[in-house]
Image (cartoon, grey):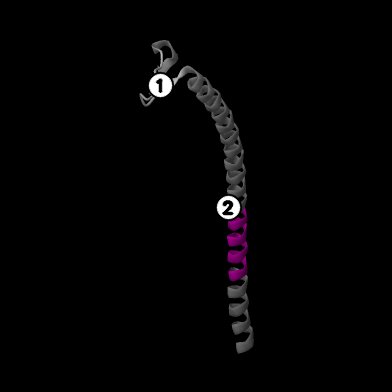
Amino acid sequence: MIQKSEKNIVRDVSGSEITKNEAESLHLCCNTRHGERQRLQSSLKAEVEYLRSFNKQLKQERDDLNDYIYELSVMVYDFKHTNQYSLSY
């Protein structure tokens, strides 16, 4: 069994014993992960903004199409009723 000196041992967050050399490499790894996490968060924020903008555009197009459909249905209704009266004479 290898003995570790007390000065060389630190504890990680979960309470496990690790050596200072291991702690330094974990710290670098955590910094790398933190940078990667920030890049991912930034990318996700940009994607969310794009999707919100796209969703807003789709809602506007849907509203425009619904207005157009309503206008067409009114025109069809008017056409049917106007032709019925003109044909009855």
Q: Residue at horizontal 62%, vertical 48%? A: 54
Whole-percent x and y of residue 4?
Answer: 41, 17
Q: Residue at horizontal 53%, vertical 23%? A: 25
Q: Amino acid at mark 1?
A: Ile
Tell us which disc is closer to us: 1 or 2.
Answer: 1
Nearest the viewer among 60 and 12 is: 12
Q: Residue furthest left?
A: 15
Whole-percent x and y of residue 47?
Answer: 60, 42
Q: Is residue 83 left or right of residue 17?
A: right
> Where, by quadrant of the figure, is residue 82 drawn?
bottom right
Q: Look at the magenta stretch and give its main secondary structure.
A: helix
Q: Is residue 68 magenta?
A: yes
The image shows residue 23, relative to residue 38, as above or below, that is above
Which label sits on residue 17? Answer: none
Q: Residue at horizontal 39%, vertical 18%? A: 3
Q: Is residue 31 left or right of residue 19?
A: right
The image shows residue 74, relative to residue 35, as above or below, that is below
Query: Callout 1: few (<14), some (14-19), or many (20+) C-alpha neighbours within 10 Å?
Result: few
The C terminus lies in quadrant? bottom right
Q: Secondary structure at mark 1?
A: loop
Q: Is residue 14 left or right of residue 79?
A: left
Which label sits on residue 59? Answer: 2
Query: Callout 2: few (<14), some (14-19), or many (20+) C-alpha neighbours within 10 Å?
Result: few
Q: Secondary structure at mark 2?
A: helix
Q: Residue at horizontal 60%, vertical 53%? A: 58
Label 1 sits on residue: 2
Q: Residue furthest top?
A: 7
Q: Amino acid at mark 2?
A: Lys
Nearest the viewer among 6 and 54 is: 6
First in residue order: circle 1 vs circle 2: 1
Whole-percent x and y of residue 40?
Answer: 58, 36
Q: Which residues are magenta?
A: 60-73
